[in-house]
Amino acid sequence: MPKTKTLKEINCYANKLETLELNGIDNLEGIVCDQNLLTSLDLKDKHNIEYVSLYSNRISLEEMARIVEQLPARSENDELGLLYAIDSEDYADENTITATSVQLAKNKHWQVFDNKGRKNSGNNPYEGLNIEDEITDTNAWDGNIYSWTKGNGTVNNPYLIETPQHLAYLAQQVNNGKDFTGIYFRQVNNINMGAKQLGKSKGNFIPIGFFDAGYITDNNGKEVFKDDSKRFNGHYDGYNNSISNLYQQYDNEKNKTVGGHGLFGCIGPKGCIENLYLGKTCLFEGGFEGGSIASYLEGTISNCGSHATVKGTSIIGGLVAVLRGGTIKQSFFAGLCEGTLNVGGLAGYIGTAEEGEKTAPKVMDCYVNANIKSLYSYVGMALGFIAEKPELKRIYVTGALTGKVATSMKGAFVGAIDGALVPEMNKLNIENCFFDSDRINIQKSSSDGDIKGITAKTSVELKSDEILSLLGSCFIKAEKGDNRGYPRLRQANINSTQLNLNHNSNCKILVNNNRVTIIGKGNKDIVIVYDMGGNTILKTNSTTFTLTQRNNYIVTVCGEVFKITL
C-alpha cells in the first residue's frame, strides 16, 4: 500500500478477509477488522494505534502474543488502549489469548475485552486463558520413550502411566502388535506432550495403534477381508486427568493405512478408554478418518471430554472419526472440528462392525458445545453420517455449524443418513436428543429431513430444568459461567472400592483435624484430592494443605491412592 499520513482509521469487519496489509499507514489510530478469517495482523511501528478490534478471526495464541508485543506502550496519563480480542459467544471465533498476554497488555496500559455477542456493547474485560502451565511444564515430553515401572496390569494393580514417556511407550508397543487384551492402565498425572518445546517434527506424537482393514481381491479374483490393524484392546483409565500440548500430523498415504489421526488410532472391541480429557493445546491434523480421542472405535469411550482441535479431509469427528459397533457414552466435545466430508462433533461416521457381530453403534449421555466446520459436504453438530441403525439417547448439541457446505448437505444434529434408512427415519432407536435452534443456523435435524427423537429447542429451553430432567442423571446444571450455562456431565466417580489401597511407595498421609500432611513425596509429585463423588477438590504440589469440610476423601499422590477421613 502506498504511504499515507492521512488515513487514521480502518473499518473492514465482516468481509471474509484472510490477510490485511497495513504497511505504509504510518499514523493509524484505530482498526476494526473483526469477523474475518485473519490468522495474523502486523502492527509493527503503529505507534499511534489506540484501539484494535479483531475478535472472531483465527488468531492463534502465539500470533496473539506477537500482536500484543507490538502494541505501543501508553503512558499513565493516556487513556487506556482498547483491544477487543475474542467473542466467547461466537462459536466460529478461533482467536486465543493467554492470561500472560493479557497481563502484558495491561502493563502497556491496554485493556483487553471479550465482545460476548455485543453484551455491554462489547466492553467486557477479559483475563485470558490460563493454559501456560500446560505449555511450559518442565515435565513436558522430551521425545524419549520409557516403559512404565509400577503395577502389574491387573484391575486392582494397573500399570501406572505417570509420564509422557510412558504414553509414548504404550503407542510403540501397540504399533508393534501388542493389543493388551485384559490389561489395565491408569494415568495418574496430567501429561504434557511437549509440542511447544519439541516442535512439530520431533514432537509429532504417533497414534496408539492404527486401523488398516478392508475387502481386497485375491489372486483367484475372490473378495476377501484383510485386516492388518493394530488395535488397543486394553483398559485405559485417565483417572480424571488430562493430556495437553500434544501435536499430531498423520499422513494416511505415507503410513499406508486406512485409519488416520487421533490419540488412539484404533480401539478394538474389547478396548475401553475412560475418565480422560484432552486440553485446548492439543492439535490433531491429517488426511481422512481423524478424531481427537480415537480415529477408529470398535470398543468403548466413557466419561471423556475434548477441547482439542481436529482437522482433516473426509470422516472427521471431534471425539471419534469412525464408530463401528462401539459405544460413546457420558462424553463431550467442546473444541474445533474441521473437515471436508462427513464431519461431526461426536463422530464423523457411525455404523456396525465390518466383520463379526453386527452390533448397533451407541451414543448416549453426550453433548457438543463447539464449532463444527465442513468445507464441502455432510456435516452435523453431533454426527456426520449414519450408515446403519444406531442407538442415540440423551444427547444435546449447541454451537456453530460453519464452512462453505451447502444447506442441502448439513443438518443441525446429523449431516446425512444412508438412503436405505431414510424410509425408517421415524422408527430409529433415538430418544431425548436435542439441538439448539438459536445457535445452529439450520432448522432441520438432518439434511434428509427431521428425524423422530431429535427435537429443536431454544437456548433458554436447553438450559431449563425440564430438559435437564429429560437428559437424565448423568447431567447436572452448569455452575455460573460454566459451559456457557448449558447442562454439563457429572465427572466420573472415583470409587474407592475399586482402588488398590495397598501402598508400595514411601508416601504417607497424616491428618490432624482439617490439616493434611504428605510425607515422602517428591517436589514434582502432584497431589489430587477428590470427594467421594469423583469431583476434583484440590490439585497442589504442596506437602501440607487444609480441607474445609469434614468428610471422606480420595487422595492420589506418588502413583498411589489413599482414602482419608477428616
Image: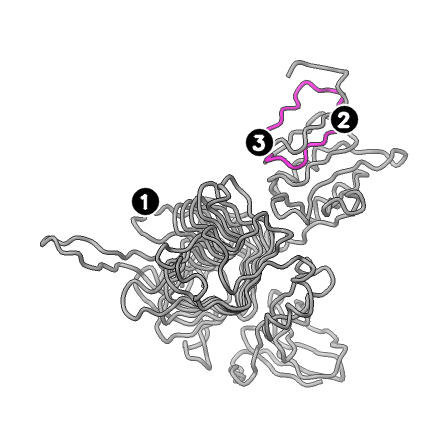
Q: Amino acid at mark 1?
A: Lys
Q: Earlier in the sequence, mark 3 or mark 2?
A: 3
Q: Quadrant of the N terminus?
A: top right
Chief secondary structure of the magenta portion: loop
Q: Which of label 3 and label 2 is nearer to you?
A: 3
Residue in the foreground of this view, choosing between 510 and 333: 333
The spot of residue 26 in percent (x, y) is: 73, 20
Residue range highlighted in magenta: 17-38
Label 3 close to label 2 by CB (< 8 Å)? no
Q: Is residue 34 magenta?
A: yes
Q: Amino acid at mark 3?
A: Glu
Q: Which residue is labeled 3 in the image?
A: 18
Q: Which of label 1 and label 3 is nearer to you?
A: 3
Disc 1 crowd, CA 10 A, few/some/many (<14, 14-19, 20+): few
Looking at the image, is 163 positioned above or below residue 409? below
Residue in the foreground of this view, choosing between 449 and 514: 449
The spot of residue 327 in percent (x, y) is: 43, 68
Q: Amino acid at mark 2?
A: His
